[in-house]
Amino acid sequence: MFKLNTYIIYRNKIYTYEKFFKSIICSALVLFAMPSFAQTEQMTIHFKNGDKVVYPVTDIEEISYSVIDTPEPVKEVEVGDYYYSDGTWSSGKEAPLADKTCIGIVFCKGLCPEAEDDCEYKLKDGVTPLDEVHGYVVAINNAAESAAWGSWDADGDEGVGTSYDQTDFRGYSNTQAIKAKAEAEAGGLSDDADNNYPAAYYATEVYESTVPAPESSTGWFLPSAFQLKYIYNHNEEFNDNFDKVEGGKAVYGRDAIYWSSSECFKSSLRYWAYMVNLDSSNITPGYISNQAKKKTYEVRSILVF
């Protein structure tokens, strides 16, 4: 490069001083603005929660996409829901599912808030504890139209040992006590009204043989006095649903009187048991009454799941 008058010759080109210096400055600015590193493509994954992950494309060997089957969320239990033979349930506000067998109606959601329930529930196998009480289910039909509770003479002053409280939810433990007494005295439950406990027999073994309870439930048992009373108190929430199930019979209806699993101690009359009147034609239905065990009433099973 050399100076010739007012011109500069650079790389075989002639520039005025002004153009030469403008060219040099522009080139310098371009060089300065260029990054001093090589560019790398990258992929950014944006998540719904706002997080994001950036991967350099050179680190990615393969991208694959697949569809994973995820179970549908379990519907929360509600009073009036239909309960099925496979241990599932559906909304009582709709028709029962046509591809399933409805075996009962949910009459109480979760542990009952209105009564004491200290039962140690086990699954139908009789060994595995029930981890959580989702609800109580009443069978869609009777286990027996007429059955005695048991033998007044055989129990004597000791009774079976069930609860005689009219305000608890101990139907499960009551039934276990009746079964234990029958096993000890007669080798098991039967319909022998003189030496056994027909009401509990029909509520458990007989009904199980025709309408098996799901393995995920406690199996059928004879409700306590207050469990039947509770069904009456809340029957408007689900009683109509029995008519929507094939073979269903409402618990609260004409001439409906049921044995409970609760005993009543009568000091002068030995142990009796409580029946619960759910007769819709009665002037004052829904009452609990102590009766001699040899009297016969209807039997309706319930279960817990």
Image (spheres, grey):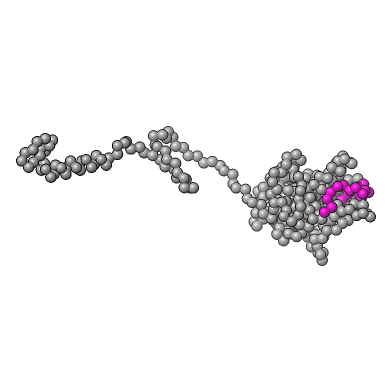
Name the one closer to the observer, 203 or 19. Answer: 19
**Residue 172 x/y as whole percent:** 78, 47
For the magenta stretch, what is the residue range? 147-165
- Residue drawn at x 84%, y 42% is 180
**What x and y, as percent, mark residue 243?**
72, 57
Camera-nearest residue between 286 and 24: 24
Quick check: 187 left or right of 230?
Answer: right
Left or right side of 107 for 199: right
Is residue 240 shown to the viewer in this render? no
Q: Residue at x 81, y 48 (%)?
A: 174
Judge by depth and name the residue closer to the eye, 145 or 62.
62
Relative to 291, is 93 on the left or the right? left
Question: Does the magenta-highlighted stretch encompass residue 149?
Answer: yes
Whether residue 158 can be seen here: yes
Q: Which residue is drawn at 8% across and 41% down?
A: 7
Would you identify the image quadrant in which residue 296 lies? bottom right
Q: Position of residue 89 (x, y in %)?
A: 67, 50
- In the rendered image, residue 72 lying in the magenta stretch gets the answer no
In the picture as drawn, the residue positioned furthest to the bottom comes out as 283
User: Does residue 208 sit above or below 295 in this rendering?
Assistant: above
